[in-house]
Image: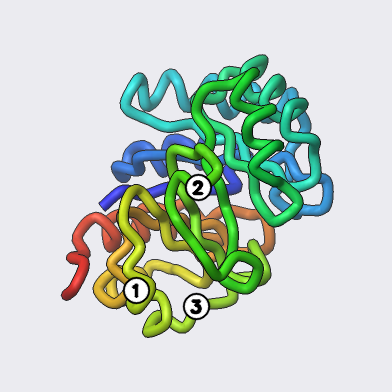
Amino acid sequence: MYVKVCGLKTVDAVHAAVDAGADAIGVVMNETSPRAVPAAVAKTVVDAAHAAGGDRLDIVLVVNDMPAADAAGLASDLGFTALQLHGRRYSAEDFAAAADVFGTLWRATSLAHDPALEVGAYGERRLLLDAPKPGSGERWDLSVLAELGLTGEWLLAGGLDPANVADAIAQAKPWGVDVSSGVESAPGVKDLDAIARFVTAAKGASPGG
């Protein structure tokens, strides 16, 4: 099971995720998010992730309020390996503009905004299916997700935590999972032990039970 830990702000959180076996870490640069960091902090986190995870770790810039081409340039400048364009403001044309600048794109959306889902529909490598209110910790109706029959590299996000991720994987059968608020002691403050427990639980889970 592929595991992404998102919203990281510190080197210690990077090490906690990498040491636990996470496959990806995310850094948020949305102005309105409690997990947002300025470019200088993002660069520190990215450099630590490269040093700790080497070539095996995906290092993802997450944006939802920045022009796509600008975000792509920023991802390239700061050393990210993937760019996640998050939300319905980004069109297929935005993805094409970003792809001209930066190679690896992820798309994050919600059933509330995009009921007809297909991995790669906008040219993205991976699709992240988030809750209707990103970063809120709100959970999906997993029975609905199980009926979608999504294929390809898609990640489940929204309301996941160390206690429920294994059950969510068994029901929704995603290719991977993403967590942010579910491993925090307060909004934007990562709990290092919770990160380790989440990754361990997700890695030990089996789609379909």
Q: Residue at x 29, y 60 (%)?
A: 202
The residue nearer to you, when weighing 21 against 104, is: 104
Whether the residues at callouts 3 and 1 have beta carbons within 8 Å, the answer is yes
The answer to which image quadrant residue 77 occupies is top right
**What type is the residue that disc 3 sits on?**
Trp
Q: Which residue is mark 2?
A: 121
Q: For residue 168, which numbered disc appears in the image?
A: 1
The residue nearer to you, when weighing 161 against 70, is: 70
Using residue 97 as the reference point, say whether residue 176 is left or right of it: left
Q: Residue at x 31, y 57 (%)?
A: 151
**What type is the residue that disc 2 sits on?**
Ala
- Element under disc 1: helix
Q: Residue at x 65, y 63 (%)?
A: 134
Using residue 148 as the reference point, say whether residue 157 is left or right of it: right
Q: Which residue is mark 3?
A: 140
Q: What is the distance, in whole Å, between disc 1 and disc 2 at their CAs?
A: 25 Å
Question: Around disc 3, counting alpha carbons within 10 Å, would you say few (fewer than 14), some (14 to 19), or many (20 or more)?
Answer: many
